[in-house]
Image (tube, rainbow, N blue to C red):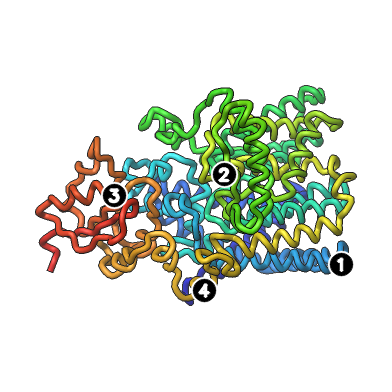
C-alpha cells in the first residue's frame, strides 16, 4: 500500500512538472493565452498517441521510454519547471486578494479535497468504468493487440480508447491509487479555461463568478475524480471552440492546429463527442461565411515543419484503424453497440425532449423522494399533466441520484438553458448565436438518436456544449443573475459542500446505510467495494488465494460484469475473456484444457462446465442470479 501510494504521488508530481514545462516552452509558438490549458491538451494528446501505438503494435518498450523521457525532462529542465511552478503558486495566492479571501479560499479547500479524493478514493459505482474503461489496457496487453474478438463486453474493443488508456499511467501495477487524477487535471483545466476565456471577454469579476458556477455543478464534481472520459470531452470541446474563435479573429494557423488537435483528442476520449462536435464545424464554417472572412492564413512562430508530426498525432487520435476494424468485423463503425444509437418515433422524440429539459435542473438532493419528495413529485406531475397527457405517454417519475451516471447541472441548469435559448432567439452576436445553435443542435441530435435510460442519465451527453456556454455566452448573463456575485458564489460553495457530502460513490459522511464514507476502507481494504457493494460474496478473495503469478486464465462472462478486479489481483497472469453466447457457443471453440483456471460469470455456462469430466469446480457463489459465478481447474490440477 505505502509503495503504491509513493509511486502514484510521484507520477502525479511528474505529470504536473511536465505540464509546467510545456506551459513555459509553447508560449513562443502558441502565445500566452490559455497556455496552461494548451499544455494539458498537448501533453495528454502525446501520451494517448504513444500509448495507443504501444498497444496496437504491442511495443511495451514504449512505456519505459516514456517514463525515462519524463524523468529526464524533469531533471534536465528543473529550473524552468520550478520557475513555472512558482508562477502558478503566485497566481493561486493572488486570486483571493483580488476577489475576496473567504469565498475563494473555501473554493480552494474544496478543490484540494477533490484532488485528495482523486488520488486515494476507490472507484465506486462506476459500473461501466470497472467493466471496460479501466480494464481495456489489460485486455489489450493480454491479447497482444487492440484488434481482438476476445472480450466480455463489446465496448471493450469497439469504442474510442484514447482516454481509457491514459488510466494505465496509474493502473499498470494492478492498483487504483491515483486513477482519478486524469479526470481531475481536466477538471482544473476546465475551470482555468472558463476563467481565462470569460475574463478576456467581460471582466475578471464575472469570470470568477462563472468559474464558481461551473465548479458547483454536480456533473463536474462527480466526474472530477472519475475513471470515465466525460471530463476529457468537456475540456476538449471548450478548448476547441476557443481556438476556432481565435483563428476566426486572428487567422493564425497555430490556432487552427490546436482546434483540430482538440477535436481529435475529444474524439479519442468519448464516443458521443464524435457525434456532437461536428456541429461546431458547421457553426465555424457559417461564422466564416457570414462574417466574410477570407481563408488567408497568417504566420506564427510555429513552423510548417511541425505539420507532419502534428498530422500523424491527429491521425492516431482519430483512430481510423479502430473504426475500420469495427466495420470489417461487425459491419458497423461502432460495432454491435450501434443498437444504442437509432432514430425514434417523432412522438417519442418530443417526449424525451421535454424530459431532458426537466432533467437539466438538479436540486442536489440526497435521494429521490427522501427528505424533499415535493420537488421531484412536482416535476413529475408537471410533465405528466401536460406533455405526457397530450402525447398519451406512460406516467413518468422524475428521480434524483447523487452519482456521476445520473448527475446533471444543479440549480444553475436554469442559467445554462437561459443562456442558450436567449442567444438562439434573442439579441446576441453572431459567434454567440452560432455557439448557442451548436448546443441546441446537440440536444436535438441526442434526443433523436439516444433512447432514454431510466437508470442512466443521458443529460451528461449535453455537458460539453452546455458547460461551454459559461465560457462563450458570458455577456448574456452578465447583467442578469450574475450581478449578485457574492450571493451566487456563496450559493455555489453550499452546492459544493452538499455534492461532496452526498456523493453516493464516494460519500464524505454516512447519510444512508448504503453510503459508506470512502476513507473507511481506502487506506485499509481497497477491495471492500467488491465484496460489500457489488459481488456480495468472497469471489475476489478466493481468486486472490488461488491465482498464481503466471496462470493461464479463461473468464467466461456476460456484458456489464466488473472485469478489472480480476486483472487487478493478477496483473502478471495470462487472462483471456470470452463473452458467453449460449446460441452460437463461440466460447466452446476454446480448448478448455489449455487453461489452468476457468472462471464462469454466467449461470448458463456453469451448467455446461459442470458436465465436463476434465474440469472440477472448486468454488461456487452462494448468491443467486444475476451474480452467479463458479471457479474451475483441470482435474489433474486438483489435489
N-terminal label among 3 and 4:
4
Q: Are marks 3 and 4 in contact (CB under 8 Å)?
A: no
* Badge nearest the viewer, 2 or 1: 2
Q: Dot 3 surroundings within 10 Å: few (below 14), some, or many (20 or more)?
A: many
Nearer to us in this view, 303 or 581: 581
N-terminal label among 2 and 3:
2
N-terminal label among 1 and 4:
1
Q: CA distance from mark 1 to mark 4?
A: 37 Å
x%, y% of residue 98? Answer: 88, 63
Residue hosting label 2: 457
Residue hosting label 4: 520
Q: Is residue 375 above or below residue 472?
A: below
Secondary structure found at label 1: helix
Q: Are marks 3 and 1 in contact (CB under 8 Å)?
A: no
x%, y% of residue 261? Answer: 62, 41
Q: Which mark is residue 97?
A: 1
Nearer to us in this view, 143 or 639: 639
Residue 75 visible (yes or no): no
* Badge nearest the viewer, 1 or 4: 4
Residue hosting label 3: 602
Amino acid at each position: 500500500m505505502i509503495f503504491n501510494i509513493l509511486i502514484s504521488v510521484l507520477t502525479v508530481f511528474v505529470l504536473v512538472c511536465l505540464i509546467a514545462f510545456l506551459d513555459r516552452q509553447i508560449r513562443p509558438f502558441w502565445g500566452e493565452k490559455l497556455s496552461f490549458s494548451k499544455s494539458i491538451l498537448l501533453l495528454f494528446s502525446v501520451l494517448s498517441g504513444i500509448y495507443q501505438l504501444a498497444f496496437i503494435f504491442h511495443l511495451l518498450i514504449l512505456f519505459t521510454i516514456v517514463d525515462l523521457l519524463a524523468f529526464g525532462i524533469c531533471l534536465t529542465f528543473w529550473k524552468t519547471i520550478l520557475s513555472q511552478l512558482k508562477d502558478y503558486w503566485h497566481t493561486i495566492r493572488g486570486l483571493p486578494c483580488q476577489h475576496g479571501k473567504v469565498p475563494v479560499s473555501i473554493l480552494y479547500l474544496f478543490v484540494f479535497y477533490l484532488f485528495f479524493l482523486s488520488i486515494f478514493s476507490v472507484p465506486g459505482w462506476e459500473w461501466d468504468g470497472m467493466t471496460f474503461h479501466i480494464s481495456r489496457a489489460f485486455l489489450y496487453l493480454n491479447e497482444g493487440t487492440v484488434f481482438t474478438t476476445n472480450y466480455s463486453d463489446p465496448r471493450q474493443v469497439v469504442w474510442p480508447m484514447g482516454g481509457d488508456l491514459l488510466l494505465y499511467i496509474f493502473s499498470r501495477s494492478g492498483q487504483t491509487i491515483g486513477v482519478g487524477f486524469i479526470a481531475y487535471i481536466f477538471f482544473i483545466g476546465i475551470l482555468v479555461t472558463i476563467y481565462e476565456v470569460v475574463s478576456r471577454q467581460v471582466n475578471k469579476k464575472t469570470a470568477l463568478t462563472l468559474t464558481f458556477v461551473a465548479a458547483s455543478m454536480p456533473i463536474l464534481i462527480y466526474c472530477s475524480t472519475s475513471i470515465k472520459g466525460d471530463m476529457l470531452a468537456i475540456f476538449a470541446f471548450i478548448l476547441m471552440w476557443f481556438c476556432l474563435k481565435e483563428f476566426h479573429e486572428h487567422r493564425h494557423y497555430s490556432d487552427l492546429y490546436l482546434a483540430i488537435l482538440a477535436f481529435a483528442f475529444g474524439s479519442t476520449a468519448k464516443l458521443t463527442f464524435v457525434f456532437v462536435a461536428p456541429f461546431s464545424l458547421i457553426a465555424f464554417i457559417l461564422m466564416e461565411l457570414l462574417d466574410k472572412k477570407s481563408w488567408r492564413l497568417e504566420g506564427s512562430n510555429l513552423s510548417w515543419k511541425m505539420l507532419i508530426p502534428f498530422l500523424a498525432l491527429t491521425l492516431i487520435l482519430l483512430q481510423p484503424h479502430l473504426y475500420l476494424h469495427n466495420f470489417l468485423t461487425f459491419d458497423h463503425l461502432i460495432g454491435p453497440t450501434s443498437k444504442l444509437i437509432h432514430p425514434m418515433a417523432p412522438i417519442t422524440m418530443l417526449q424525451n425532449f421535454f424530459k431532458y429539459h426537466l432533467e437539466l435542473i438538479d436540486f442536489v438532493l440526497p435521494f429521490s423522494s427522501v427528505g424533499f419528495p415535493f420537488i421531484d413529485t412536482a416535476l413529475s406531475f408537471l410533465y405528466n399533466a401536460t406533455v405526457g397527457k397530450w402525447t398519451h405517454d406512460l406516467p413518468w417519475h422524475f428521480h434524483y441520484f447523487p452519482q456521476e451516471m445520473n448527475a446533471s447541472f444543479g440549480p444553475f441548469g436554469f442559467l445554462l438553458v437561459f443562456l442558450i435559448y436567449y442567444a438562439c432567439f434573442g439579441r446576441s452576436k453572431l459567434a454567440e448565436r452560432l455557439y448557442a445553435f451548436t448546443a441546441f443542435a446537440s440536444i436535438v441530435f441526442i434526443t433523436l438518436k439516444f433512447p432514454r435510460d431510466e437508470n442512466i442519465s443521458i443529460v451528461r451527453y449535453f455537458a460539453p456544449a452546455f458547460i461551454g456556454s459559461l465560457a462563450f455566452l458570458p455577456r448574456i448573463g452578465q447583467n442578469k443573475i450574475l450581478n449578485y456575485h457574492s450571493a451566487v458564489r456563496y450559493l455555489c460553495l453550499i452546492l459544493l459542500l452538499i455534492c461532496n457530502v452526498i456523493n453516493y460513490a464516494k460519500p464524505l459522511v454516512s447519510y444512508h446505510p448504503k453510503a459508506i464514507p470512502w476513507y473507511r476502507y481506502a487506506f485499509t481494504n481497497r477491495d471492500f467495494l467488491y465484496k460489500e457493494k457489488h459481488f456480495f460474496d468472497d469471489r475476489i478473495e478466493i481468486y486472490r488465494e488461488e491465482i498464481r503469478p503466471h496462470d493461464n486464465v479463461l473468464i467466461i462472462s456476460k456484458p456489464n460484469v466488473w472485469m478489472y478486479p480480476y486483472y487487478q489481483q493478477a496483473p502478471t497472469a495470462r487472462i483471456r475473456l470470452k463473452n458467453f453466447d449460449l446460441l452460437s457457443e463461440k466460447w466452446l471453440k476454446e480448448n478448455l484444457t489449455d487453461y489452468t483456471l476457468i472462471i464462469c460469470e454466467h449461470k448458463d455456462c456453469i451448467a455446461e462446465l459442470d458436465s465436463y469430466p476434465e474440469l472440477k469446480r472448486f468454488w461456487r457463489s452462494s448468491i443467486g442470479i444475476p451474480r452467479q459465478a463458479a471457479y474451475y481447474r483441470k482435474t489433474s490440477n486438483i489435489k
